[in-house]
Amino acid sequence: MLVLNATYEPINVCTVRRAVVLLLKEKAEVVEHTERLLHSATATLTRPAVIRLVSYVKVPRDTHRRKITRRAVFARDDWTCQYCGSRAQLTVDHVVPRSKGGGSTWDNIVAACAPCNRRKGDALPRQAGMTLARQPRTPNPDIFIQVATPTVPATWRQYLSASVSATAAGSVAA
């Protein structure tokens, strides 16, 4: 389930169970629901797809401190090699190799296919005759919503940023 703050800003993804607990405790309300039903011994309710917290929750905006994972790098780079555009055999590459002082930071790590990563090796891109499709950057916070779920349902797209929605356009709706 997509969790929205009281301001309709996406802040998290949670399980159906957690969403129902928030709803039953009246800490959240249903914004979008699916056609599926949830049954208990005493009640039946529609399965929520998007919930909104009743009270505003302050969310830290320090995405530069968020853990860098392969999946987050791939999602940020649209699951595409930043050197040749391939979508196969993706690996993570340090633009400035660690042996040459490059750090493991958002602005020094890109998605690269295995052949490009081997070709670049321990060199700078210009030394290997390679160029980046785009400079690496700290991702939009919404990218972590995409990373948290394998598919982004259609009901979520209007609440997510354009970059995540465009990337998810091919995803199967739940």
Image (spheres, rainbow, N blue to C red):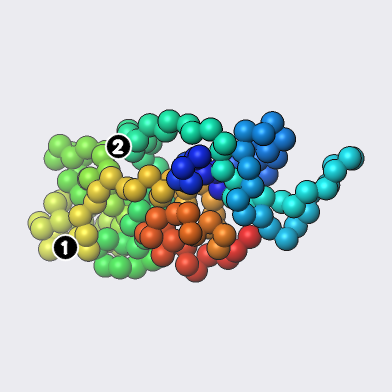
Local secondary structure at mark 1: loop
Is residue 111 positioned above or below 100 on the image? below
Is residue 64 positioned above or below 89 on the image? above
Q: Label 2 is placed on what type of residue? A: His
Q: Say whether residue 16 is left or right of residue 67.
A: right
Residue on which disc 1 sits: 130
Give the percent coordinates (x, y) of residue 40.
85, 42
Give the percent coordinates (x, y) of residue 45.
78, 49
Q: Say whether residue 8 is left or right of residue 15.
A: left
Residue occupying the point 10% across, 58% down:
126
Front-most of residues 138 and 10: 10
Residue occupying the point 56% across, 48% down:
2
> Residue 24 is drawn in which quadrant?
top right
Residue on which disc 2 sits: 64
For marks 1 and 2 on the same chain, the one whose residue lies earlier in the sequence: 2
Is residue 38 positioned above or below 115 on the image? above
Q: Is residue 17 something one can see in this rendering?
A: no
